[in-house]
Amino acid sequence: MKCLTNIADLSGPALAPRYRPEDHKPGIVHLGIGAFHRTHQAVMTDAAIAKHGGDWRIIGVSLRSRALAQKLNEQNGLYTLLERAPSGTSARVIGSIERVIAADAMATLEALCAAGIRVVTLTVTEKGYGVDRTTGLPDRSDPVVAADLGQPESPEGVLGLLVAAIKRRRDDARPPLTLMSCDNLPHNGALLRSGVVGFARMIGNDELADWIGDNIAFPSSMVDRITPASTPETFREAALQTGCEDTAAVETEPFLQWVIEDNFVSGRPNWEAGGALFVDDVAPYEKMKLTMLNGAHSMIAYAGFLCGCKCVRDVMSHPDLSLLVRQHLKAASGLLDPLPQIDFSDYTQALLERFSNPSIAHETYQIASDGSQKLPQRIFTPALNALDAGQSVRPFAFAAAMWIRYCAGRRDDGTIYELLDPRAEELSRAITAGGGSKAGLIDAFGALPRLIPAQLQKNPIWRSELERVLSVAFSDSCLVAVSRQATA
C-alpha cells in the first residue's frame, strides 16, 4: 500500500483538499503540532484556503517529538482526519501543513523570522509557556526559561524563541506578528502577552518590551473539540478511507468550535470558512468551556480512571458516575453569566451527548495528565466562585478529592500507574507528607506553591467536603466514594 504523499494517490471515500497545497506558501508557524492542533486549527485553515485561497499554509513545530515530524514530512504534510459520529465515520485529507520542524530551536527561529509568516499559533499545553500564572511573568524556576534568560540569542523555549524572533523581525523591517494561544487557559492572549513582554524586560531590553506591547497582537481564543489519542485502529480506518498508509492520521468528534478575538496586525486566514466565530471578547466563552466541559472532563478523568473506566464513554454508561457528571455540569452552569446565543441547558445536553459518543475512545488516563496545571482554572477557581455566590461547592470538592486520591499512584486493587504531571515528585511527596491523615493530606496539598488558592484552602466548608470524600476513597474504595457522592 502506498504511503499518503500525494493527493492523486487517494483511492478511498475520503475527501481530498479542494486546492493544490503546493500552490500556497506558508503564512503561519504553529508551535506544538500535536493531534489537538491537527483536528482544529489546521482543519479550519484547510477550509479557509479551499474557499478563499491565500498563502496561509502552516509550518509546524514539534517541540519534543522527532517521530511525528518525520511522519508528516514523509507525507508532505498530508494526513487523514477521521470524524467519528455515532452514525459512522467520515474522512478527509488535510493539506494545510507545509512541513514540520523537529525539535530544532534554530530552525524554528528561522521559520518564525521568515518574511511570509504573519501569524504564530500555539498549543504547547498549560505547562509549555513557562509563565507563572500567579504573577503572569516568566517563571524563573522553569529550567528552560532560566536557560533562555541567560542566553537570549540562542533560545530553546517558547518565550525565548518568540522574543528573539520579534526582535530580529523588527530589526529586519518585517511585518509584526500576531501571536495566538489556542490552549485551555483563561485569558490566554493576555497571559501570553504578559509572558513575552516580561521576558523582554527580564533580559534587560525595556525598549523592546515597550515595542512589543505597542505593535504585537495577542488575541485570545477558545477551542472546543474532543481529540483522543490515535491508535492502531485509527491508522487502519485511515487506510480504508484513503487507500493509503497514513501513520499521522488523527480522529475526533464531529463537533468543532473556535472562538477568536478579532485582533490581528498583519492579516489572517478567513477561518470563518471552517466555522470560526470572531468576537470582541472571548472571556465568557473561555469561562463556559473551562468551567463546564474541562471541569467535568477532569472530574470524569480522576473518578472514572480510579473506578476502572478506561474511556469517557464508559463513565457515561456507569449510573453513579454519569449522575455525578450531570451534577457537575449543573453546578458549573450556575456560575456563569448569561451569554448571547448560548443556552446553557442546550450546551449541557450537547456535552452529555459528546461524552457518551460510543465512537470516541477518549481515555481517562490521557485526560488525567498534568492535573497540577489544569485544576486551578477548571476546579479551584469555580470552587471559589461557588463559595462567593453562596452555592454548593460539593461537586468541585469531589473532583479535587478524586485528584488527590489519583496522586497516590495506585488503584484500590493495588495497581500502580505513573503519575503524568510536571510536578509529579511534589505531588507524591505531598501524599507521603499527609501521613494517612485526611486533614494532613489537605494541608500537604494546600502547602504546595502556586496550586490551591489560600482563600480556598482555609475555607472550612471546602475542607470539610474534601475530608468527607477522601476518608471514604482511602478507607473504603473509590467506587464507594462515587456511590455515596451520587446518592447524597
Image: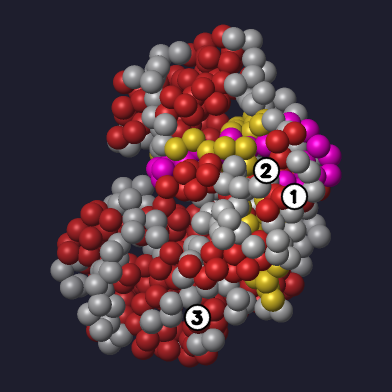
Q: Residue at x 30, y 52 (%)?
A: 423
Residue where numbered disc 1 is placed: 17
Question: Which of the two labelled residues, at mark 2 and mark 1, occupies the earlier sequence position?
Answer: 1
Q: Is residue 51 magenta?
A: yes
Q: Is residue 469 magenta?
A: no
Q: Is residue 43 visible?
A: no
- Return the residue found at the far front: 1
| Disc 2 residue type (three-letter) | Ser
Question: Which of the two labelled residues, at mark 1 and mark 3, occupies the earlier sequence position?
Answer: 1
Q: Residue at x 53, y 35 (%)?
A: 192
What stretch of residues is rendered in magenta? 46-66
Instruction: Classify residue 52 as left or right of residue 28.
Output: right
**Mark 2 nearby-residue class (10 Å; few <14, some 14–19, many ≥20):** many
| Disc 1 residue type (three-letter) | Pro
Quadrant of the image occupied by residue 199: top left
Q: Nearer the viewer, mark 1 or mark 3?
A: 1
Instruction: Tell me if residue 448 comes above or below residue 303 in the rendering.
Output: above
Residues at marks 1 and 3, CA–CA distance in whole angstroms:
36 Å
Q: Which disc is residue 315 wearing?
A: 3
- Where is residue 254? Give x, y as percent: 69, 66
Instruction: Classify residue 382 as left or right of residue 278.
Output: left
Residues at marks 3 and 2, CA–CA distance in whole angstroms:
35 Å
Instruction: Say what secondary structure mark 1 lies in.
Output: loop
Quadrant of the image occupied by residue 220: top right
Foreground of the two, 269 or 378 = 269
- Where is residue 172? Give x, y as percent: 59, 9
| Disc 3 residue type (three-letter) | Val
Q: Residue at x 59, y 42 (%)?
A: 76
Residue where numbered disc 2 is placed: 96
Foreground of the two, 249 or 225 = 249
Q: Which disc is residue 470 wearing?
A: none
